[in-house]
Image (cartoon, coloured by chain):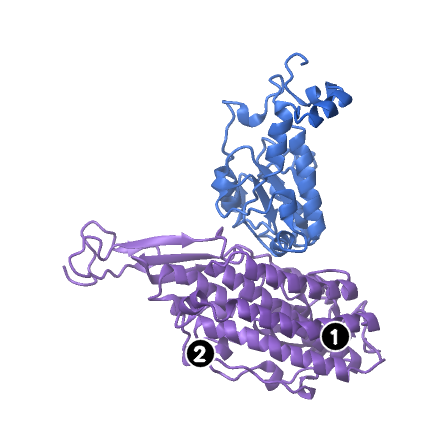
Chain colours: A purple, B blue
Amino acid sequence: MTPDAPPSGAPAESLYGPRSYRVWGDDALAGQFLEVSMGPHHPSTHGVFRMDVVLDGETVVRLKPVFGYLHRNHEKLAEGMSWLGSMPYTDRLDYLCSMTNNWAYALAVEKLAGLGVPERAEYIRVIVGELTRLVNHICLAGFLLADLGALGTPLLYAFREREKILDVFEEISGARMMCNYMRFGGVRADLSPEVLQKIARIVDRFPAFLDEFERLVSGNEILLSRCQGVGVLPRDLAVNAGVTGPMLRASGVDYDLRKVDRYGIYDRFEFRVPLGEHGDVYDRYMLRILEMRESISILRQALAQMPEKGEILHPQAKLRNFRPKPGEAYGRIEGPKGELGFYLISDGGVCPYRYRVRPPSFINLTVLEDMCLGQKVADVIVIFGSVDIVLGEADR
Amino acid sequence: MEQGRTGVALGAAMDDRLKSELQRAGIFVTSLEGIYNWSRRSSVWPLQFGLACCAIEMIATAAARYDLARFGAEVFRPTPRQADLMIVAGTVTKKMAPQVVRIYNQMPEPKYVIAMGACAISGGPFKQGYNVLKGIDRYLPVDVHIPGCPPRPEALLNALMFLQRKIDRQTLDASRPLRWYDPMDKAEFPVPSYGAHDLTPSSNRAFWKPEATPRNEG
């Protein structure tokens, strides 16, 4: 039998094009591929994602992601409603980080309408944005460890800390998860001194929690052996595929929009951008832990520098009958998952003419097959978990 | 015992003072139905199955602060074969609806459904979308609806307590047989498939009976 020729009786075509059969030795099972559909109901697919995996034994030969199980027509609905009307919908894009979604959308609209943001509102945005980053990264670490088999403890620790931050969000916006907090030209509600104290307390205690979390898991032998050298994403591929966020930085590319664009007031803060060396799952995990420490540093500076009083909404901001002048704008921020951008076209009407989201989750997922090829099927879940996706954003 | 009843009636009919006297002697009297329902209500195992945003709140409910374990329902089972309760947590799209029904079919009876959040109830904020199912109760018999977008963890706890009360009311009475004891009952619900324009059938007419409006008449 020659390599790449189908064994007798085996189909030459699969669902995904011609099969390539390899023959290894005299084993009767050699070259017998197994197609496994992982998802959409799979406890570790972070929602409703499906991977059609072709396996040779336990090794992944091909992986085809299947999207669309949570396609909720976000962009189309937004084109039919007022500019502000899609603000609550952006909450539901990446439902772990509603504040940063709000921010990206507000930024794009402000660019389109030429609106400024008062200084105090900028500080509030940075504070809630970095708190959101803490929530996202700690939840990711918890979920990743749950995928690795540490089913309870790390996730419970993560959610314990998340609840404290959600309490703050609830106090300032009225909702735990879906905050709908930003407005074009500012934010919706001011932070009271009590809330700022609460945030300061969280910021003070978070490093101790991170130490505790790291003592629990970071040096764990199982974590090291399951994560190190698994799912390596080469630097060039990461750049060429448009991967952004912690995924890109774990591959060693120094690209953080907070440094590159310096949107908002990020030029006023001192912080470092952690970079990975190997681009494997462990680097991606560790990078998020390090980023959380930097977020703490940004939060400390923001709390210290924040002006005592001031406007939180630009005087020219209009909540009702808001019609930006015709034109187009692309606003982007460094979301916890990567570059989250909104591309908007206005025809001068009450609703956007075109509304498009650049979702980091979706674009980071495009390299999933490249990372998984040649790995074992059990590692697929780990690699997938380290990408950090939320299906609400990937499928929209 | 009342005729034909093994039920709660026995516990109720018994004199309270006699009951407490027996309890002091270490004898606890209850009805078969009472202990049957009590054990079922205290170990509802939900299916670990998240669809969208509400799933995060579902996880938060199971986590330390809200602690679903207090109600005996913390054992999230990844496989439908071991689950009693399906919490439909999030938007059901038309691409996902067949899978949801199929998973429900794989669960053993008796099984319950909680529709969590506005999307699972009615499509919620995404109702206008062409790809969003306007409520899972078109295909599944929902026991408890939780409004909210997303509902708070307390709301899910409340829904679980509500479901427990519902389980309490179930009876072994032969004159009112439960659906799943009926040998002629069709255990499987029809799984919708993606037709030319929409899901077919568009609903399970066995239990989804919307009021007649000019649009859906006939």
Helix, strand or loop under label 1: helix
Q: Nearer the viewer, residue B1 or A45?
A: B1
Q: Is residue B75 above or below residue B20?
A: below
Crowd band around label 1 with a 10 angstrom C-alpha radius: few (<14), some (14–19), many (20+): some
Viewport quadrant of the N terminus of chain B: top right
Helix, strand or loop under label 2: helix
Q: Which residue is mark 2?
A: A240
Which chain is home to disc 1? Answer: A
How far across and down, in percent of the image, does residue A41 sit? 49, 50
Figure quadrant of residue A260: bottom right
Q: Is residue B84 above or below residue B152?
A: above
Labelled disc at residue B163: none
Q: For the residue marked with disc 2, what is the amino acid?
A: Asn
Lower sequence index among marks 1 and 2: 1
Q: Residue at x 49, y 42 (%)?
A: B80
How far across and down, in percent of the image, does residue A82 sit? 73, 64
CB contact under 8 Å: marks 1 and 2? no
Q: Nearer the viewer, residue B176 or B158?
A: B158
Q: Is residue A85 above or below residue B27?
A: below
Left or right of A217 on screen, residue A324: right
Q: Residue at x 57, y 51 (%)?
A: B93
How far across and down, in percent of the image, does residue B57 sit? 64, 55
Q: Which residue is mark 1?
A: A200
How far across and down, in percent of the image, does residue A72 sit? 60, 56
Viewport quadrant of the C terminus of chain B: top right
